[in-house]
Amino acid sequence: MKYGVRNSFKGKVKEIKKGTVMCEVVVEVNPTTTITSVMTLDSLSELGLKVGDEVTALTKAIHVILVKE
Amino acid sequence: MKYGVRNSFKGKVKEIKKGTVMCEVVVEVNPTTTITSVMTLDSLSELGLKVGDEVTALTKAIHVILVKE
Amino acid sequence: MKYGVRNSFKGKVKEIKKGTVMCEVVVEVNPTTTITSVMTLDSLSELGLKVGDEVTALTKAIHVILVKE
Amino acid sequence: MKYGVRNSFKGKVKEIKKGTVMCEVVVEVNPTTTITSVMTLDSLSELGLKVGDEVTALTKAIHVILVKE
Amino acid sequence: MKYGVRNSFKGKVKEIKKGTVMCEVVVEVNPTTTITSVMTLDSLSELGLKVGDEVTALTKAIHVILVKE
Amino acid sequence: MKYGVRNSFKGKVKEIKKGTVMCEVVVEVNPTTTITSVMTLDSLSELGLKVGDEVTALTKAIHVILVKE
């Protein structure tokens, strides 16, 4: 299985916040790093996600903004 | 300075690949993790980015896809 | 502070509509122009945004679609 | 004709920069504001865009990041 | 009317799920294919969408991820 | 393998156009429908894609714009 994306992180689901149509899923990549995803409740349901599940978080390079302070 | 995004990573520019309109910038977050951004050459020029520069990489939660294997 | 994006607009927060997970923030750029952002309530909270605050709205060129009528 | 997006700006094409696969189109909304779009050369060709053409630039609210300085 | 996007599909609105700020609209492209869009309730209201309406669904090529299994 | 996205299409790679940093990949879903993806050449290389390969094209519902004509 290969994904055509530049950014891919493995982690465990740490928290799921459900709204009425959307939800927010926090993934712990390591003790000091989390990645958060927003998706529809329908997608959450299809994934069958629950806290503790192992997932891979993907994001395309084009969606990353760099800031120089 | 605060950004309205869920995902923010500090790192150093490791590599810059220039195309004719777009470019690809690889940021080293830690020895085992990189994050890649694609932007226009115009944005790269405005940032004045070069290898070794410290940057913050931002991506909204909505742009993150979770995959369960 | 520099952002690696082509589109950047300064304005004042005009309205905030809160949902259960997401919210919608309307920014007045000038008397005839507004720009609207959708983000998580978590991001809104981190920004500590309230009506009247000065903000900068950013969007990458790749997220802009042109239509010819 | 109606678009399901929060952000819509009318303007005139001011500049087109062609790459090998992608291109960058700068749209002048008013004398002090431009909006830039990146698209494929294929899309540019289908639109038949040239400098001076009137276009509408669309972007969804979810693609807008707010920053508080 | 021409759109500067690579992916465009005509269909009929099959279902609308309303949340508090966002909504989810399912479009039937043909008997075996649907495309789903998430937008703000404000955009839904502006479009005046109801089940059965004919719409065109647009997505830029940059937003499509390819996976090889 | 499950993806947290609303829109998923299986097809075969029909054409690959390479630029200097980015590339455009056209996927034939059926005789009358194609879906196009833009990614970095690095992602193309990692996928090892060639014409005829079977792939799945993914896009989140939030990236789909509906238009009513």
Image (cartoon, coloured by chain):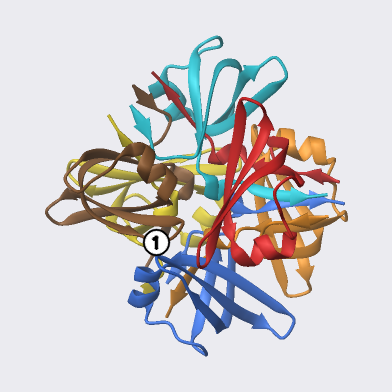
Chain colours: A red, B cyan, C brown, D yellow, E blue, F orange
Residue under the point 85% across and 47% down: F50
Q: Where residue A32 sits in the image (x, y, percent)?
A: 61, 25
Q: Residue furthest left?
A: C31
Crowdedness near tag 1: few (<14), some (14–19) or many (≥20) residues, C-alpha within 10 Å: some
Residue F11, relative to residue B61: is it above or below? Answer: below
Residue annotated with mark 1: C19
Disc 1 marks a residue whose amino acid type is Gly
Residue D54, relative to residue B33: is it above or below? Answer: below
SS for dot 1? loop
Q: Quadrant of the N terminus of chain F?
A: bottom right
Which quadrant would residue A9 be assigned to in this image?
top right
Q: Residue furthest bottom?
A: E52
Residue A61, relative to residue F5: is it above or below? Answer: above
Q: Where residue B59 sits in the image (x, y, percent)?
A: 52, 38
Residue E19, relative to residue F12: is it above or below? Answer: below
Q: Where residue B44 sits in the image (x, y, percent)?
A: 46, 24
Towards the viewer: B46 or F56: F56
Q: A41 left or right of A56?
A: left
Residue under the point 59% across and 49% down: E62
Q: Quadrant of the C terminus of chain F?
A: bottom left
Q: Is residue C65 visible?
A: no
Q: Is residue C56 visible?
A: yes
Towards the viewer: A19 or C28: A19
Q: Where residue F16 sits in the image (x, y, percent)?
A: 75, 48
